[in-house]
Image (tube, helix red, strand yellow):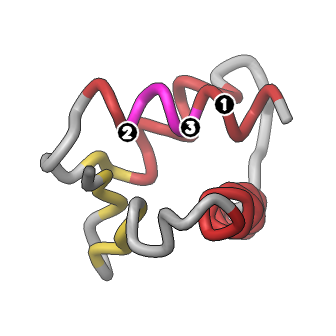
C-alpha cells in the first residue's frame, strides 16, 4: 500500500537509526485529528509480512518504547 511504501521510505532514509513512532505518524497522518498507535502497528506488520515474503525477515526492527529501525 502507499502507506507501507512511505513507512519503508522513511525507515530506509534513516537506515540503522531509530525512527520514532511519532515521526512516522506525523509524516503519514499529520492532518488527521486522531490516529491510533495501533494504526501504525498494523501498517508496519503488513510491511513486515511483505518483506518476509521476499526473504527480508529482519529488515524492520521494533525498538520497544522508541520506534523502528531498518536494516539491510
Asked if 19 appears above or below 48 in the picture, the reply is above
What residue do we see at 42% from left, 29% from top? 10
Badge 3 marks a residue whose secondary structure is helix
Question: Which mark is drawn over residue 11?
Answer: 2
Badge 1 marks a residue whose secondary structure is helix
32 displayed left or right of 22: right
Question: Which mark is drawn over residue 5?
Answer: 1
Check disc 3 and report the residue beneath it. 7
Asked if 70 appears above or below 11 in the picture, the reply is below
Mark 2 and 3 residues: CB-CB less than 8 Å, in contact? yes
CA neighbours of label 3 inside 10 A, class few (<14), some (14 to 19), many (20+): many
Quadrant holding the N terminus: top right
Magenta span contains residue 55: no
Q: Residue furthest top?
A: 31
24 displayed left or right of 53: left
Instruction: Please name the predominant secondary structure of the magenta segment in the image.
Output: helix
Q: Residue furthest right?
A: 1
Question: Which mark is drawn over residue 62?
Answer: none
Percent across and percent down for residue 24 are: 49, 38
CA neighbours of label 1 inside 10 A, class few (<14), some (14 to 19), many (20+): few
Specify the segment rendered in magenta: 7-11
Percent across and percent down for residue 18 are: 20, 53
Amino acid at each position: 500500500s502507499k502507506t507501507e511504501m512511505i513507512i519503508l521510505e522513511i525507515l530506509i532514509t534513516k537506515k540503522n537509526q531509530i525512527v520514532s513512532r511519532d515521526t512516522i505518524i506525523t509524516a503519514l497522518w499529520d492532518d488527521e485529528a486522531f490516529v491510533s498507535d495501533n494504526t501504525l502497528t498494523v501498517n508496519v506488520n503488513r510491511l513486515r509480512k511483505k518483506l518476509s515474503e521476499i526473504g527480508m525477515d529482519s529488515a524492520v526492527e521494533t525498538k520497544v518504547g522508541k520506534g523502528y529501525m531498518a536494516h539491510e
